[in-house]
Image: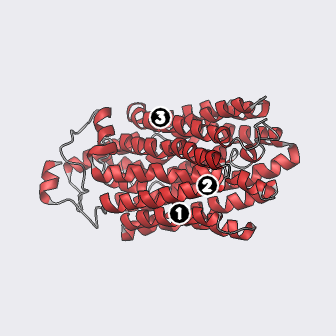
Amino acid sequence: MTSSDFTRGIRENKTQVAHQLIQVMLVGFAIGMTRTVVPALAESEFGLERGSFLLLASFVVAFGAVKAVMNFVAGRWSERVGRKRVLFWGWVVALPIPVMIWYAPDWNWIVAATVLLGVNQGLCWSMTQTAKLDITRAEERGLTMGLNEFSGYVGVAIAGILTAYAAEWLGARVGLLVFGMAVVLLALVLTVVWVKDTLPWAKAETAAHKAAPPKNPPRYPQGVSEHPSTGEVFALMSWRDRRLFAISQAGLVEKFVDALVWALFPVFLVGKGASLTEVGWIVGVYGFVWGGSQLFTGRLSDYVGRFWPNVLGMWICGAGAAMVVMGTGALWWSVSVGVAGFGMALLYPNLSAAVADITPPAWRGSAIGIYRFWRDLGYAIGALGLGLAASLTGAAEAAFWFVAISMFTSGAVLFWLGEETHPRLNPAGPREVADA
């Protein structure tokens, strides 16, 4: 194939972009089917003792820890065997999940199913993101990430609502079995038949950058080899480069909000008298606002930069978490999680876009995988923290304050250590280009 076969751009690769958007929506369906029914019916359907906040959070802890590791593995693996193969095996791993939830004699089976879900999400969601970045241009990264996360989190919201109705019509176990198997089988067929491997686009981009440096060169980390080791990339993302450290810690803490909405918010609402379908719709507001807003928040960052959307997103999201426990009623809770969802929409695609801005295509897959490692480890750390906060006080409300304070603090760290990463707004100087 010639270099012209690897032209990048959303419009130029619209068919593959569309296939990847369908994939990430199905990934959202897979996680969304556990968002409403499983935590809300943990006591009545799966035998969890009332008030066991830490045990309730355990399935989110397991999910976050496993997904974090698989993000790390997926990024490195995809640079060796290709994006499509990693995506395929992610869906193969998901096949037993609906059956395990259907059969589950106790809560341990739910935790085990969630471990497999973490593997699935780490492999599949990572690949939909990386693949689209491979085939789109640098000036489209915000829009690309916005489209990706819009599709995924609208999928999460839709699945939460559909499975709530399916549980009422068919029963919790059968409803999740039918929905889950349909999603996984469809995803496998689409992966095999229509998805292309995009690794050749990443290799072509690396070659093009060597032949003709871009007009606005990115501010890549200095003193890094062309093909750094896994340990070197991990160190850069985790502490050596202050910009990448700031982004990684923000990614970790923002997952506290999602862990809260997943693990404790349905239980909080049921405890306040909400029905299962009401819980589905209120939690759905969070997903719809988060997903829908990313259609423009990602594109917005292509014009105004990544820094301020990320910082303000952290603080707005924290405010939404605090608002939940400052009022009562379905309307108030819906508005509160809508605020949190909008904050997530500002920061979620743009933290990833910032990583992509300042990491070279030769090891961008690894960098994104390590960022996603830290980000999704936030599920585990956040779920453990909010579970402890609720257990020690005996009230779910303490978990909301724990998350709000964490978001405000992390946003301050990002403000202090971060900087604008968009190459057009903050390009590298001649000396940085020479040293890169």
Identity of the residue drawn at 45% across and 35% down: 74
Ranked by sequence position, the earlier of labels 1 and 2 is: 1
Residue beneath disc 1: 317
Foreground label between 1 and 2:
2
Ranked by sequence position, the earlier of labels 3 and 2 is: 3
**Mark 2: which secondary structure?**
helix
Q: Amino acid at mark 3?
A: Val
**Mark 1: which secondary structure?**
helix
Foreground label between 3 and 2:
2
Name the side, left or right, on which 109 lies relative to 82.
right
Task: Mark 1 and mark 2 in contact? Answer it, CB < 8 Å.
Answer: no
Q: Amino acid at mark 1?
A: Cys
Camera-side residue of 24 and 372: 372
Camera-side residue of 50 and 86: 50
Residue beneath disc 3: 69
Q: CA distance from mark 1 to mark 3?
A: 26 Å
Ranked by sequence position, the earlier of labels 1 and 3 is: 3
Q: Is residue 226 above or below residue 397?
A: above
**Mark 3: which secondary structure?**
helix
Q: Quadrant of the N terminus?
A: top left
Q: CA distance from mark 1 to mark 2?
A: 17 Å
Q: Is residue 369 above or below residue 337?
A: above
The image shows residue 95 at horizontal and vertical percentages of 67, 31
Residue 398 has which mark?
A: 2
